[in-house]
Image (cartoon, rainbow, N blue to C red):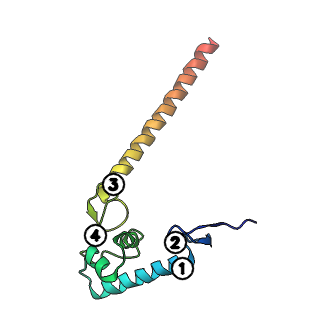
Amino acid sequence: MSLNVGNCPTCGKVFAKGTRTVCPACHNEIERQFVLCEKYLRENRKANLQELSDETEVPIKLITRFIKEGRISVYNSPNLHINCDVCGQPMTGGAMCYNCRHRLSHDVLNAAKQESAKIEEAKRASIVFQAKKEE
């Protein structure tokens, strides 16, 4: 049995990897920052991302991660928005806005249809080749 160890991407310390991607000390710090954000938003529902970061001293990148993970609900905070990873448009959660998700789904469906058509064409060509070979 081997021990799965690695360096914490935040602080660089060696730690036993398990379900977490950072060491216990960094995990505790992230949780502390989450609680700060949560508490501030309970008292200041109309705060925007910059104000939340300024007042809690939690980096915008980490707050954005909390929102994308669904840990901070933007539905309770109407001025808290993040940007779509694809097009940059403001949105309320996740990594992609509705339009980009829809476009991606459409593109994947079309690619699957094209692949299926190629497979069917290859099967037909194989059948024709076998028939000519038997003649």
Say which residue label 1 marks: 25
Kind of residue at disc 3: Val
* Label 1: which secondary element: helix
Q: Are marks 4 and 2 in contact (CB under 8 Å)?
A: no
- Packing grade of label 2 (10 A; few <14, some 14-19, many >=20) is few
In the displayed orientation, state which residue is furthest to the front. Answer: 12
Residue 55 is situated, as x and y percent measured from the top left of the image, at 29, 82
The residues tagged by marks 1 and 4 sit, at their Cα atoms, a distance apart of: 29 Å
Q: Are marks 3 and 4 in contact (CB under 8 Å)?
A: no
The residues tagged by marks 3 and 2 sit, at their Cα atoms, a distance apart of: 29 Å
- Relative depth, front residue between 20 and 14: 14
From what the image shows, is residue 89 above or below residue 50? above
Kind of residue at disc 2: Cys
Say which residue label 2 marks: 11
* Label 3: which secondary element: loop
Q: Is residue 124 visible?
A: yes
